[in-house]
């Protein structure tokens, strides 16, 4: 599936690493940073997650929620959350439902069954406003925060 900027983001309802359910619709009224990463507890993924955590207060001040997704198990995601001290939800997408919905199933054309590192910025009405297809985990959280700030300043969708 191809996800297009300016179009509604694919809806989802998924179980998080702590057994709760989270739907994109639950996050209406705020911006959503939906970031996919290949594998929990690996150096690049840990660096990226910790950077989002370090900027979490800044995202919150801009009415934005951060949600991480990988094809790991719930237990592996929970261990990753604990090891990195993360206070935002992680979605274990072992069935690859979200990875397919968002078109991020990567690694040898999807044969490895992991999500490629990509990020989606969704506005408070559920419309995709920005898509990073190529992500360098070092500095990416700040890059997303900068783009969020620019979109809000330009009035792409007012923060509530």
Image (cartoon, grey):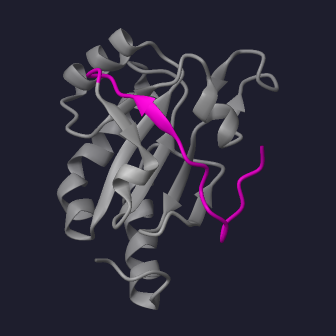
Q: Is residue 142 above or below residue 16?
A: below
Q: Is residue 133 above or below residue 145?
A: above
Q: Is residue 143 magenta?
A: no
Give the x, y percent position of residue 60.
22, 61
Q: Is residue 104 visible?
A: no
Give the x, y percent position of residue 62.
27, 70
Looking at the rendered image, the quarter that the N terminus falls into is: top right
**Front-most of 44 and 112?**
112
Q: Is residue 18 magenta?
A: yes
- Tell me the residue at 50%/83% (across/down): 156
Q: Is residue 104 above or below residue 28?
A: above
Q: Is residue 45 left or right of residue 16?
A: right
Q: Is residue 90 visible?
A: yes
Q: Is residue 155 above or below residue 144?
A: below
- Tell me the residue at 37%/60% (across/down): 142
Q: Quarter of the image holding residue 86?
A: top left
Q: Quarter of the image holding residue 143?
A: bottom left
Q: Is residue 147 left or right of residue 80?
A: right
Tell how many labels: 0
**Front-most of 5 and 11?**
11
Name the residue furthest right: 109
**Front-most of 17 and 84?**
17
Give the x, y percent position of residue 118.
59, 45
Looking at the rendered image, the quarter that the C terminus falls into is: bottom left
- Tell me the residue at 47%/69% (across/down): 125
Give the x, y percent position of residue 123.
46, 68
Q: Is the magenta region chiefly helix, strand or loop?
A: loop
Residues drawn in magenta? 1-19
**Front-most of 138 and 108?**
108
- Tell me the residue at 45%/49% (across/down): 24
């Amino acid at each position: 599936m191809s996800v297009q900027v300016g179009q509604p983001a694919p809806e989802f309802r998924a179980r998080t690493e702590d057994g709760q359910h989270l739907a994109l619709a639950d996050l209406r009224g705020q911006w959503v940073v939906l970031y996919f990463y290949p594998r929990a507890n690996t150096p690049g993924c840990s660096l990226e997650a910790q950077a989002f955590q370090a900027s979490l207060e800044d995202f919150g001040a801009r009415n934005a929620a951060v949600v991480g997704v990988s094809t790991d198990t719930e237990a592996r995601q929970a261990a990753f959350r604990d090891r990195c001290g993360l206070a935002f939800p992680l979605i274990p997408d072992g069935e690859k439902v979200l990875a397919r919905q968002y078109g991020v199933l990567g690694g040898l054309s999807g044969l490895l069954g992991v999500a490629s590192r990509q990020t989606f910025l969704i506005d408070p009405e559920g419309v995709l406003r920005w898509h990073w297809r190529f992500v360098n985990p070092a500095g990416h959280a700040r890059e997303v925060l900068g783009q969020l700030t620019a979109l809000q300043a330009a009035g792409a969708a007012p923060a509530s």
